[in-house]
Each structure stands twice: as structure tokens, then as C-alpha cells.
């Protein structure tokens, strides 16, 4: 696919990859965060 | 480099042949198809378990299975239907339709898309393997409350890892959907021009990102409590089992909206098409979805009114829960207003959409009853709750999925399905689902508890009726499979590109069946 993307699509996918990483990092933070949050209770 | 053969890209040939096509595909339509077939299979696996449940309950006494196995059926039925049938069906529809609806050539991250799908069968292999390990499958209910769930046998780690895998799949799917919608739209496709189905999914995807990690965290803590000596939820070690319920429902309530917001989107596509009018109050519909999503984070404790909460907590969660009825009402009224004075016709997708409107609303009303704290003290853990959530999930979420399949099947296959068999499927399903679940309201009000294999004799009649309804519903779904296969094999003739007289949107501008690659050059949206 990506070989036949036009320039606009290539650029869009680049931006999409960046945001995917950001959102993925948020998800991981939530996962770790829930442990930290609960641990403060003890 | 640039010989004549080089300009000849493999990708333009369309799909690869045989198994490789499905294993290695990065095409959103192939992946959508995989999700949808997977979901259909799981619908029958989970459905078979429901049949076992209803067979056991057809008359009082211990009839068919032993109580431990009954509990496994109840637990696995719910897990499979939620994570295997309803959610993958919506993701499949998202894969097929969102790129075409926003004028994108594919999902933004096609290789991750392949992974999102293929780890699903892995997760379900883990889950289904639990039937064959010592102690049997999980049996503590899909809500896996400790301490009961910690008594699960060797199935427990499989369950936890299974949920992790399904969670990762959902999160990757949600990320892909968000970045596709945010970055891949055709020029001119502004956010407030997107079809409502796309909006519904965008907001759903954010909910998934927010709550799936919380579920994963909760089950990890159960795992460490059971095997590694922690005491997150163990009172003897200074932990708190009620804390688990809070974390679980912080995930669980948004989860129920994850299963209904895409359905709202589907209904908002179908009703305008068959009423031949524009959707009434487009932006109000978008804001209503957003409001419901926001509120879904602050209502979770309505599932635990009976645990012994401070009155301020009871009141807070009662009022926030009731507030959800406001944006939900906005949606219902807007759908009705869309039909008002429309030139309506009643093809199968529209019939399903209308049944959704009536029957989902019944589920909404019983939800409101459950939201009233003193009333819920009576209803909680009774069959009234079972009736409530089946009304919102079966004639709600599942009917919306069926409506969507009938609506888009001609676009997917290039052929029209049989309207006669579609309508037969509709009427049998609609009548039998009410026969199944309406009497359960009465059972609950009369005091029959949920999750039991036997009951007092005064509940006999309504249980008998409910079981008959369930068997008819189960059998009727074979018609659905017939209609789909018949349609794939040519149906009742070729479909036009528009398919429906009243249809609007980019997906109807491409040929039927939709070519393997669409919108490789972005369309111009005015
Ligand atoms: C007006 C909207 C709604 C309200 C006010 C509402 C309210 C409630 C309340 C108070 C309960 C807890 C009852 C109890 O355990 O005593 C409940 C349970 C449930 N609701 Fe709803 N609900 C609404 C819509 C929905 C929707 C749209 C879905 C799913 C698509 C849904 C799915 C469920 C499920 C699955 C349960 C049972 C969970 C369990 O204990 O296993 N509800 N609802
Ligand atoms: Cu809830």
C-alpha cells in the first residue's frame, strides 16, 4: 500500500503514526496509573 | 529500476489468493470481513450457551446440567457475547465503512489493523481453553468480583491473559480508528460533515482508550492477589473487595456505552435513508453522543447501590445516572422527528432500526427504574436487571448490527439479499426476543434472583415462556446465516451503486461490490 500512496496520504499516515504513539502512551499511562492510584490507599 | 514490469504494482491486482490473503491482509475491507465472520461465529458459540441456560431454566428443579457448569455457562455466555460478538461486529463495521465514509484509501495503520484482528482468535482460544482445565471455566460471573472469582481453578490465569489480549486488540483497533478519522479524511470532509456513524465510533474509540487499561489493571491485580501474595482486594491483608467493584464498573459502565454508541450511529444512518429526509438535528446528535460519553464516566456506582455507600454517594450516582436520559431522549426524539412526514418505506434495515427505537427505549426506561436508589435495593441482582440489559443489548446493540448488515450487505457483495427472508428473520426475531425477555421483568419484580440454576415454583410459568422465546430466537438466527450466504452467492440480483433510493454519502458513490481499493485519490467533498 504505502508504496502507492500519493504524497498527501503519505503525509497523513505520518501524522497518524505520531498520534497513534501518543494515544498508545496515554493508554499505557492509564494502566500503570491505576496501580499507582490504588497503591496510595495502603 | 524503471523497467516496464516495475510500474506494474502487485497491489493493484487486488487480493492475494487462498489463506495468505486472510492471514497477511492489510486491506480494511478484508479485515472488516474477518471481524464480521468472527463475530457471527462467536454469536453462535455464545448463543449455544444461552440455549443451555434457558433449557436448564425451562422448569424448576435441577434438570440438565450441574450447577457449577451452569455458572460457567452464565459467565462465558456474557464474556463471549460482549467481547466476541458485539464488540468485534462493531469494529468490523468500522473497518469496512469508516475509510469509505470519510474518503480515505484505507485505515491509517493497516499493518497494526491486521494484528488487532489476529490476536482476537488467540484471546478467545485462551478463554475457551478454560473449559478443559482442572476446575473448569470461570464461573463467578462476567463481573469477576473477588473473593468469589479468586476461587476459580487453573482457568484463572487463562482468563486474565485472555482479557489482556482482547483489551490490547480493542485498544489497537481504537487507536487506528481515531487516527484514521482525525488524519485521513478527504479534503472538505470537515468534522461536522462526517456521517454520524463515524462520529459515534470516534467517541467510542476514546472511551475504549480510557477504560480498557483500567480493566486490564483490575484483572492484573486479581492475578497478583491470587498468585503473588498481594492484597489489593483481600480484606484480611488490608485490601478491600468493594474497591474492585469500583474499578470494574469504572470500566464497566463506559463499556456498555461502547456497545451502544456505534449502534446509535448506525440507526442515524438508516432512518434518514428510508425516511428520505435529512437527519433531524445533526449537530444535536453529535453533542448528545459526546454528552452521553462524558456522563458514562460518572455513573458507575449505580451498579453497586447495595454495597453500603454514604447517602451522598447514592444521591450523586442516582442523579448523574438519570441525567443520561436527557441526551438519550434528544436522540430518540430526533430520530422520530427525522421520520416525521418522511416518505418512509420498510425494507429490512429500516424494520430493524424501528424495532431498535421501540425496544431500546424499553431498556432505557427499565434503566431509569434501576437508577432510583430505593427501588434498586429491591431490583438489584434480580431478573429485572437481566431483562433491562438484554433489552438494551439484544434489540438494542444486536439489532443495530443486524440492521447494518442488511443495509450494507449489497454494497459489500454487489448483490441484493432476499427481502422475503430478511423480513421473516426480522419478525421471528422481534417477536421471540420480546417473548424471551419481557416476562423476565415480571420474574425480577416478583423476586427471582439472577445467576441461579433452579428457582421457586411460583416462577415456573414465566420461565417456561421465556425459554420457548429463547429457542425460537436461537433458531431464527439460522435464517440470518442463510440470507447472508444466499446474498454472497448472488442473492436476488445485482445491486446498484446507490443501492437505496434515499442513501447519501461517499460509500454509495463507489461501485457495488465496493472495489478492493477505493479512494486512492481522495474525493472532493463539497
Ligand atoms: C438510560 C440509560 C440507562 C440507565 C439509566 C441504566 C441504568 C442501569 C442500572 C442502575 C443498572 C444496575 C442495576 C443493578 O445491578 O441493580 C444497570 C445495569 C446494566 N445495564 Fe444499564 N442503564 C442504561 C442503559 C444501558 C445501556 C445502553 C446498556 C448497554 C448497551 C446497559 C447495560 C447494562 C448492563 C449490561 C447491566 C448489568 C450489568 C451486570 O450487573 O451484569 N444499560 N443499568
Ligand atoms: Cu451502568
Image (cartoon, coloured by chain):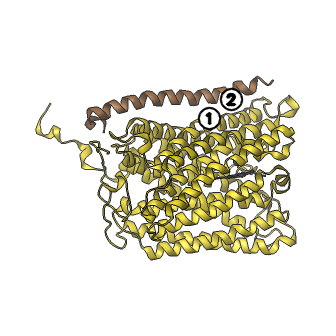
Chain colours: A brown, B yellow
> How many numbered tags mark residues here?
2
Mark 2 nearby-residue class (10 Å; few <14, some 14–19, many ≥20): some
Name which quarter of the figure residue B470 lies in.
Answer: bottom right
For this view, does B221 lie left or right of residue B238?
left
Q: Secondary structure at mark 2?
A: helix
Q: Which residue is mark 2?
A: A34
Label 1–label 2 contact, CB within 8 A: yes
Nearer to me, B34 or A30 = A30
Q: Residue at x 61, y 70 (%)?
A: B473
Residue at screen point 77% across, 72% down: B462
Closer to the camera in the image, B424 or B70: B424
- The furthest residue to the front: B341
Name the spot of residue B41 as percent of width and height, x first.
53, 59
Specify whether B408 is left or right of B265.
left
Chain letter behind tag 1: B
Q: Position of residue B237 (x, y in %)?
A: 85, 29
Residue B200: percent from left, percent from top = 52, 47
In the rendering, at what x and y percent does residue B390 appear?
67, 60
Can residue B309 be seen? no
CA gap between label 1 and label 2 equals: 8 Å
B47 over B130 or under it: above or below: below
Q: Residues within 10 Å of mark 1 (few under 14, many from 20)?
A: many
Instruction: Classify residue B182 by image quadrant.
Output: top left
| Residue corresponding to mark 1 | B213
Q: Secondary structure at mark 1?
A: helix
Task: Using the rendered view, name the quadrant where residue B384 is placed.
Answer: bottom right
Q: Quadrant of the N terminus of chain B?
A: top left
Amino acid at each position: 500500500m504505502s508504496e502507492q500512496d500519493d504524497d498527501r496520504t503519505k503525509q497523513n499516515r505520518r501524522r497518524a503514526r505520531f498520534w497513534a504513539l501518543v494515544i498508545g502512551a496515554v493508554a499505557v499511562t492509564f494502566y500503570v496509573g491505576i496501580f499507582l492510584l490504588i497503591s496510595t490507599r495502603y | 529500476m524503471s523497467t516496464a514490469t516495475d510500474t506494474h504494482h502487485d497491489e493493484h491486482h487486488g487480493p492475494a489468493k487462498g489463506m495468505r490473503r486472510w492471514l497477511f491482509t492489510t486491506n480494511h475491507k478484508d479485515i472488516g470481513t474477518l471481524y464480521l465472520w468472527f463475530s457471527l461465529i462467536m454469536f453462535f458459540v455464545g448463543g449455544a450457551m444461552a440455549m443451555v441456560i434457558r433449557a436448564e431454566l425451562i422448569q424448576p428443579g435441577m434438570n440438565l446440567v450441574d450447577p457449577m457448569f451452569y455458572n460457567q455457562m452464565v459467565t462465558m455466555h456474557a464474556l463471549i457475547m460482549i467481547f466476541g460478538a458485539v464488540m468485534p461486529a462493531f469494529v468490523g463495521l468500522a473497518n469496512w465503512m469508516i475509510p469509505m465514509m470519510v474518503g480515505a484509501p484505507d485505515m491509517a495503520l493497516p499493518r497494526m489493523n491486521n494484528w488487532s484482528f489476529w490476536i482476537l482468535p488467540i484471546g478467545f482460544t485462551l478463554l475457551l481453553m478454560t473449559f478443559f482445565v482442572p476446575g473448569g471455566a470461570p464461573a463467578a460471573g462476567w463481573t469477576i468480583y473477588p473473593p468469589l472469582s479468586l476461587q476459580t481453578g487453573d482457568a484463572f490465569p487463562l482468563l486474565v491473559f485472555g482479557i489482556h489480549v482482547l483489551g490490547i486488540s480493542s485498544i489497537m483497533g481504537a487507536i487506528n480508528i481515531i487516527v484514521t478519522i482525525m488524519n485521513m479524511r478527504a479534503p472538505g470532509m470537515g468534522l461536522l460533515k462526517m456521517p454520524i456513524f463515524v462520529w459515534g465510533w470516534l467517541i467510542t474509540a476514546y472511551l475504549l482508550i480510557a477504560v480498557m487499561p483500567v480493566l486490564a489493571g483490575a484483572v492484573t491485580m486479581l492475578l497478583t492477589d491470587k498468585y503473588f501474595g498481594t492484597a489489593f482486594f483481600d480484606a484480611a491483608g488490608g485490601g478491600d473487595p468493594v474497591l474492585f467493584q469500583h474499578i470494574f464498573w469504572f470500566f464497566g459502565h463506559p463499556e456498555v456505552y461502547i456497545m451502544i454508541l456505534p449502534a446509535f450511529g448506525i440507526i442515524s444512518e438508516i432512518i434518514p435513508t428510508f425516511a428520505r429526509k435529512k437527519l433531524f438535528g445533526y449537530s444535536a446528535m453529535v453533542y448528545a453522543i459526546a454528552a452521553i460519553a462524558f456522563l458514562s464516566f460518572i455513573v458507575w456506582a449505580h451498579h453497586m447501590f447495595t454495597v453500603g455507600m454514604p447517602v451522598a454517594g447514592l444521591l450523586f450516582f442516582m442523579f448523574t445516572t438519570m441525567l443520561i436520559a436527557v441526551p438519550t431522549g434528544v436522540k430518540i426524539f430526533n430520530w422520530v422527528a427525522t421520520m416525521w412526514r418522511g416518505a418512509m418505506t420498510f425494507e429490512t434495515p429500516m424494520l430493524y432500526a424501528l424495532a431498535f427505537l421501540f425496544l431500546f427505549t424499553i431498556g432505557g426506561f427499565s434503566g431509569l427504574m434501576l437508577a432510583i436508589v430505593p427501588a434498586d435495593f429491591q431490583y438489584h441482582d434480580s431478573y429485572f436487571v437481566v431483562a433491562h440489559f438484554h433489552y438494551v443489548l439484544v434489540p438494542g446493540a444486536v439489532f443495530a448490527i443486524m440492521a447494518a448488515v442488511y443495509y450494507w450487505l449489497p454494497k459489500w457483495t454487489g448483490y441484493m439479499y432476499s427481502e422475503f427472508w430478511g423480513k421473516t428473520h426480522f419478525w421471528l426475531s422481534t417477536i421471540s426476543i420480546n417473548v424471551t425477555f419481557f416476562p423476565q421483568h415480571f420474574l425480577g419484580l416478583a423476586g427471582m434472583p439472577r445467576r441461579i440454576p433452579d428457582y421457586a415454583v411460583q416462577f415456573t410459568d414465566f420461565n417456561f415462556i421465556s425459554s420457548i422465546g429463547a429457542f425460537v430466537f436461537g433458531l431464527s438466527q439460522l435464517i440470518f446465516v442463510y440470507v447472508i450466504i444466499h446474498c454472497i452467492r448472488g442473492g436476488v440480483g445485482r445491486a446498484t451503486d446507490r443501492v437505496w433510493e434515499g442513501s447519501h454519502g461517499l460509500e454509495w458513490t463507489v461501485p457495488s461490490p465496493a472495489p478492493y481499493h477505493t479512494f486512492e485519490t481522495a474525493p472532493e467533498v463539497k
